Amino acid sequence: MPLIDDDDYLHLDVPDMDLIHAEFAALVNRLAEAEGEAFAALFLELLAHTRGHFAAEEELMRRTHFPGRQEHLAEHGRVLGEMERFAERLAAGKTIFARAYIEDRIPDWFAIHTRTLDYHLATFLKSAGGVD
């Protein structure tokens, strides 16, 4: 069973954001099924993807002078910090913590983040003509 369903909240009608959200969800769902070394490798792939995901959104916010930029940046920083700490635990062989983080925290965080901060960014981009 997937941790993140392909629900309406993933689709913000900003093609670049929608694609990267779908990729994020697919990685999280693959992590739910992975074991051992495959889990560790996928976690690092998710971390790298998330860095790129956030960098792309941050560039959109910078380029369009998005007024909610600072709050959004702070949330990105917080989540990346968490992921990096769990990656360190995973490297030390503490898989249970990283798995619990993926299963218990990431799906709810992603739903809230997408429905709030990303929704407001997408709405601003569409109204400001910042959508390619």
Image (cartoon, rainbow, N blue to C red):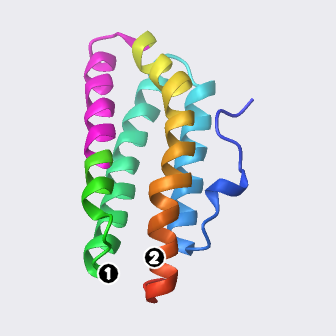
Q: Which residue shows up at 43% across the image and 84% down it?
A: 130
Name the residue beneath numbered marker 2: 124
15 or 94: nearer the eye? 15
Was residue 83 drawn as part of the magenta stretch in this picture?
yes
Q: Give the range drawn in magenta.
A: 76-95
Looking at the picture, how far across and down is residue 47, in whole percent? 36, 40
Looking at the picture, how far across and down is residue 123, in whole percent? 52, 73
120 horizontally vs 63: left or right: right
Task: In the rendered view, tell whether residue 99 sits above or below residue 25.
Answer: above
Was residue 5 drawn as part of the magenta stretch in this picture?
no
How many neighbours does mark 2 have within 10 angstroms: few (below 14), some (14-19), or many (20 or more)? some
What number of labels is visible? 2
Q: What is the quadrant of the N terminus in the image?
A: top right
Disc 1 or 2, which lies upstream in sequence? 1
Quick check: can you spot residue 95? yes
Name the residue beneath numbered marker 1: 64
At label 1, which amino acid type do we have? Thr
Task: In the rendered view, tell whether residue 14 sits above or below residue 114.
Answer: below
At label 2, which amino acid type do we have? Phe
Provide the secondary structure element on which disc 2 rests: helix
49 or 123: nearer the eye? 123
Q: Between marks 1 and 2, how big is the CA–CA gap?
A: 9 Å
